[in-house]
Amino acid sequence: MATFKEFRNNVKPNWCPGCGDFSVQAAIQRAAANAGLEPEKLAVISGIGCSGRISGYINAYGFHSIHGRALPIAQGVKLANRDLTVIASGGDGDGFAIGMGHTVHAIRRNINMTYIVMDNQIYGLTKGQTSPRSAVGFKTKSTPEGSIESTLSPLEIALAAGATFVAQSFSSDLKQLTSLIEQGINHEGFSLINVFSPCVTFNKINTYDWFKENIVNLETVEGYDASNRVMAMTKLMETNGMITGLIYQNKEKRSYENLITGFRPEPLTNQNLQLSVEDFDKLLKEFK
Amino acid sequence: MRVTLKEWASLISQLSWKIGGQQGEGVESTDRIFSTALNRLGYYLYGYRHFSSRIKGGHTNNKIRISTKPIRAISDDLDILVAFDQETIDLNAHELRQGGVIVADAKFNPVVPEGVEARLFAVPITAIAEELGTSLMKNMVASGASWALLGLPLEVFNKAVEEEFGRKGPAVVEKNVEAVRRGADFVLEQAGGPLGDFQLEPADGEQKLFMIGNDAMALGALAAGCRIMAAYPITPASEIMEYLIKQLPKFGGTVVQTEDEIAAVTMSIGSNYAGVRSMTASAGPGLSLMMEAIGLAGMTETPLVIVNTQRGGPSTGLPTKQEQSDVNAMIYGTHGEIPKIVIAPSSIEECFYDMVEAFNLAERYQCPVIVLTDLQLSLGKQSCEPLDYERIVIDRGNLVTNVPPSEDNVLFKRYEFVEGGVSPRVLPGEKGGLHHVTGVEHDETGRPSESAINRKKMMDKRLHKLDNLQVTNAIRVDAPHEDADLLIVGMGSTGGTIDQARVQLEQDGIKTNHVTVRQIYPFPTAQFKAYADRAKQIVVLENNATGQLANQIKLNVGVGDKVRNLTKYDGTPFLPSEVYKQSKELV
Ligand SMILES: Cc1ncc(C[n+]2csc(CCOP(=O)(O)OP(=O)(O)O)c2C)c(N)n1
Ligand code: SF4
Ligand SMILES: [Mg+2]
C-alpha cells in the first residue's frame, strides 16, 4: 500500500504561491493513499487551465488533455480498464463552461470515477475573465461593467441530472477535502466534488477569508440527511450553494459499467482481441 | 439521348430493378426481401438508395443491379420499375430502357408518361395486400410480381420469406407467401407468362455476402479487436454503431452513444490511451467538431481510428446524398502539424480489410487514422467476395509490457527519441511505466517543455514517423497500357463506374489506365508518379466541386499540366455514361 508521499513527484507546480489548487493536489495524494491505491493504478485526467496542470503534479498515470474534455477522456479510460481508479479534474471554466455538456452527461452516465473541480469563480490561466461561476456584478477583464449573466449552480444541475454523489469542499479544509475525495473514490458511480479553490492573483473578491465567512459546513447542520435528494436540493437553493461536505449520495444505483450488457468484471485491456474462426463465420453468416 | 451500355454486357447476364414510393411505405423492405431472394440464387447485386432526410413521406427509391458477374457500379438505365405511386413513375420512368417494364399499383390508375416506351402492368398491389389483412404486405405483392416476371423459381423466394418472418410464426409466413403468390399470379396472367427478354442467365448458386460498406467496416473493426466505440448518430455513419451495438456485447465490448462528437472522439482517445482498441465514426459535421481532439491524439501519439462517411457538405449540406468533399478537411483539419493517416477504401471488401489495417496503422505509428468513405460506399448494399479470416492480423506496434519498475520518481520515457520515431508505449496499470501525457509540448517523459531544442526534436520525431509508412495497396492499379491516352484517377465508390466507362472508351480506341488512390494522406507520390508519367492526360474524377484530389496530385506529383478535373457535386453518384462522355470530351 502506497503512502501519500509515493503519490508525490519531483515537479514543482507553476501555480502562484497561495493558489488553492495546492491543497487539492495534496488532498488527492492523501486520499489516494487512504483509499489504498498504488500510483500505477491511478489515472488522473485533467483539462486545460491553471487547475488542469494538476495531472502533472501527482505521481500516477497523468493525462493533461484539452480544454473542457477531461471527462470524456476519463470515461474512456475507465471503460477500457475498470481496474484503474480514475480521477478527472479541472477548473470551473473547463467543467462548467466549455465542458458543461460533458459534465451533465457524465453525471447521467454514472461511470465509476471521481470528478474534482477547482472552482475559483474565474479564468485563471487566461488571466482573469469571468466564469460561469462568477457572481452577478463581478468585474473582470471581460466584464468591466460587472457580469450580467446568472451564476451557474452546478451542484443543483448535478442533482437534476441524476448525480449519485455530490460534494463540495474548500481548499483551506484539507481534512474535509481529503475525506470527501476518498469517499468519492470509494463511491460506486460518478462522484462530483466541487472545491472552492481561491485564485489569489485574479479574484480579489472570492478570497480565503470571504469563503470562510460565507460557507456553512453541513456537519454543523442538524438533521441534514445526505441521502435525501429533496433536502439536498433545498439546502443548495437556500444557501446559494455556499455549503461544504457531502451533499448527496445515492448508494443504491449501480454504476454504468455494472449495467452494460455483456460487460465483464475483467478489464477489457486484459481480454483477448482475436475473434475465433467460429465466431467469424457466425458473423459472416448473418450477411447471407 | 441516353447512352445505353448494353453493348458491353448482354441483356440476359444482368438487369436493373428499381422500387419507388413514399418514404416509410415499404420501399426499403421490398428491396430487402427481393434482393435477399436474388442473393440466394447467387446473383451479384449492387444497390443504390435514393432517400431524403425525413422519415415519412417524400419520394424515395432503391435500385438494384443484378448480374451473373461481379459488378461495382450503378447502371445508367433501368429494366423494371416498381411504383407505389405516380410520382415514382414520373420521376423515374425516363431511366427505363426502350421496352422496359413498369409494375405499378393499380390503385392510383398509373399512366406512362409521354415519350416513354414501356410496358405497364397495373397490379392491385394495395388491394391484394389489404384483402390478405394489411397493406403492410404491399412489399410482398410487389416483389412477388417482379420475381414472376423474371421467371425465377418461387420456392427460393418463399425460403427468403420464411427466413424474414419465421420468428413471427407460421401463420405470418403463410400470409406473406400468399401475398407473393397473388402478386406473381396476377402479373403472369397479365403478361401471359414470364417476360422472354428478362430471363437472367442462371447464377452460380453460391450465396454471397450481401452488405453495406458500413456493415463491412463495423465487422472489420470487430475483427480488428475494437472493443469500445463511442459515437453520436449521423447519416450516413449510424449503421456502424448500430452493428456494433448489436455485436460488441457478445465480445465483452460496448458502444457508448455520447452527447456529441467531441465526447465521442475524446472518449475513444481515452480508451485507446488505456489500451483498448477504440473508434468513433461520423460524417462531415461530426468530423468538424472532432478536429481539436484529433490534434490531441497526434500530439500525445495516441492511436485513434475515425471513420468519416462523407455526405454532401458544407454545413448540413445534402445529408443523404453522395459527395467526396471532405478530402481537404481530413488532410488539413486540426491546427498545428501532426502525423495523420487518411485511407479511403474503394470497395466493400476493402471496407472490411482497411479497418483491420487502420487499427494496426494507428498502433504501429501511434497516430490518428481516418478511414474515409462516401455515402454510396457506406450505404449501397452490394455483394461482397468471401472475407478471409487469415488476413485478420492484429499488430499492436511498439507496445511494451512488464517494464521493470523504475527507481524513485524516474518516469518511463513514453516519448523516447528512437530510430523511426515510434517510441515504446506502455499502458496505465504498469508499475514500471509511469509517465505523463499532455497536449502541451513535452519531453521524452511527457513532461511539459518549452525548450527550443526539445521542441524541434519532438516535432521532427512525430512528423517523421510516417516516413516509412507502409499501407497495403496505397494505390490500386489497372494499367494495361504502357502509354495511355488517359489515366483515370478516382477514390472511394467510383472505381466500378470508371471501369465500366473504360470499356466503352477502349472500344472507341482510347487507351485508358485506372488508378484508385487509397492512401489519401500522406500522398503516395512515388507509387502514383510511375503511372502519371506514362499517361498523356490524367482525368481525376471526384464528387466535389473544387477538385480536392486533383489538387493533391498537382501538389505532390507535379503533373498539373496533364490533370483534368471531372467533378460532380449535385448529390448523385457518377453514372458510367457520364464518365464515358466527359472523359471522351477531355481527350
Ligand atoms: C478550445 C480552447 N479555448 C480556449 C482556450 C483558452 N483557455 C485556456 S484555460 C481557459 C479557462 C481557464 O479557466 P478555468 O477552466 O476556470 O481554469 P483555471 O485556470 O481557473 O484553473 C481558457 C479560456 C483553450 N485552451 N482551448
Ligand atoms: S492565476 Fe490564480 S488559479 Fe492560476 S495559479 Fe495563480 S492563483 Fe492559481
Ligand atoms: Mg477557474
Image (cartoon, coloured by chain):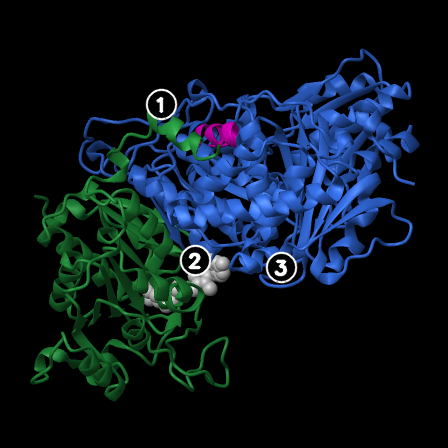
> Tell me, what hue is chain A?
green
Circle 2 is placed at which residue position? A67
In this picture, which residue range is highlighted in magenta?
Answer: B351-360
Q: Is mark 2 within 8 Å of ligand 1?
A: yes
Provide residue B200's location: percent of width, then percent of height. 69, 27
Q: Is residue B2 visible?
A: yes
Nearer to the camera, A281 or A42:
A281
Q: Does residue B354 show up magenta in the picture? A: yes
Closer mark to the observer between disc 1 and disc 2: 1
Q: Which mark is residue B127?
A: 3
In the image, the chain rendered in blue is B
Disc 2: CA contacts within 10 A as few (<14), some (14-19) or many (>=20):
many
Provide residue A114's location: percent of width, then percent of height. 24, 58
Residue A279 horizontal side relative to residue B119, left or right: left
Q: Residue at the location (37% across, 78% down)?
A: A152
Labels 3 and 1 touching (C-beta < 8 A): no
Q: Which mark is residue A277?
A: 1
Q: Secondary structure at mark 2?
A: loop
Residue B221 horizontal side relative to residue B1, left or right: left
Disc 3: CA contacts within 10 A as few (<14), some (14-19) or many (>=20):
some
